[in-house]
Amino acid sequence: MYDVIIIGAGPAGLTSALYALRANKKVLILEAKSYGGQIINASRIENYPGIEEITGFDFATTLYNQVKKLGAEIRYEKVIHIGEDKRVMTKERGYQTHAIIIATGVENRKLNIAHEEEFVGKGVSYCATCDGNFYKNKVVAVNGGGNTALEDAIYLSDIAKKIYVIHRRDEFRGDVRYVEELSKKSNVEFLLNATVTSLNGINKLESITVTGKDNQVRDIPVDGLFVAIGQEPNNEVFANIVDLDSYGYMVPIDGVHTKVEGIYVAGDARTKELRQLTTAVSDGSIAATTALKECF
């Protein structure tokens, strides 16, 4: 029996744990993969108040260690069901609690083309800071037009010999300053109005086929492709607890409440205007303080 069970060990979940632990509650964090969520892959964070610059790994690890020091129990188990009696079931066992905070975050969106899964770890990656060093002095491509893709390209520009930045529109969605920084780099080439339509190779990625808006096809030899085309939630398991929108994001009532008393949501997995580190930790603190007020 736990006072609070938190599903997800990203910034929102870990912040929830921090507040609950400081209120002297017995806290269990359940995480399907690894702590830190998406932010752990960020090469640098420059927009978090009070911290001029920090890597995503350092930020996530510091927050993780902080809640561990306060006494959080963390188990790496995937949640498969939540009952309305606030019983949380994983593949391994069941847990009972007074309050639940769902903070599962989002996953990297896939290209959904042939050989993508086959080439993961063999040329296809979703994390430049994790795998970039494998491509020293090699040719790589980054697919995407937001800040993540641009930051990945900046990070890789100091490692790879040549970088193609591929985006399906005629201009990037990310910060102008990132685009300007990349524009000044001699080893970076922009391919706009273009889409990756094929991954080619035998046993590993050897080239990509890029198709332009006028159906112009270009085969580009690359050693690696970094996919950064956004994220998507995986919330179907919680559909009995909280409504989901057409994209699969949880639609809370009044900010953090679900349809079931004592069960709350926080972070990028819910509908919201802005998905940023600051809003994730804000959600986590609000969900935890709300749970503490209503469940104890």
Image (cartoon, helix red, strand yellow):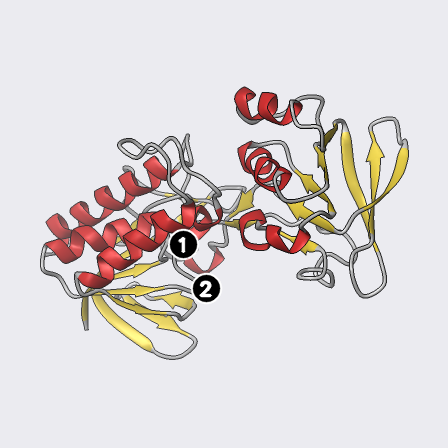
113 and 119: which one is in front? 119
Q: Horizontally, is 79 left or right of 231 in the view? A: left
138 and 29: which one is in front? 138
What is the x, y in percent for residue 112?
71, 51
Q: Quadrant of the C terminus?
A: bottom left
In the rendered image, the vertical position of residue 249 relative to residue 77, given as above or below: above
Residue drawn at point x = 54 percent, y = 49 percent: 129
Q: Horizontally, is 132 left or right of 191 in the view? A: left
Disc 1 crowd rating (10 Å Cα; few below 14, some 14-19, many 20+) is: many
Residue 269 visible? The answer is no
In the rendered image, the vertical position of residue 166 relative to residue 291, given as above or below: above
Name the outermost residue toward the bottom. Answer: 92
Q: Viewer-nearest of labels 2 and 1?
A: 2
Q: Horizontally, is 83 left or right of 151 in the view? A: left
103 and 156: which one is in front? 156
Mark pair 2, 1: CA separation:
10 Å
Q: Earlier in the sequence, mark 2 or mark 1?
A: 2
Residue drawn at point x = 20 percent, y = 49 percent: 288
Q: Which mark is residue 43?
A: none
Disc 2 crowd rating (10 Å Cα; few below 14, some 14-19, many 20+) is: few
What is the x, y in percent for residue 219?
88, 42
What is the x, y in percent for residue 110?
65, 50
What is the x, y in percent for residue 126?
60, 51
Identify which amino acid the numbered label 1 is placed on: Thr
Read off the residue under disc 1.
Answer: 104
Read off the residue under disc 2.
Answer: 33
Identify which amino acid the numbered label 2 is placed on: Lys
Q: Secondary structure at mark 1?
A: loop
Q: Quadrant of residue 6?
A: bottom left
108 and 159: which one is in front? 159
Q: Quadrant of residue 79?
A: bottom left
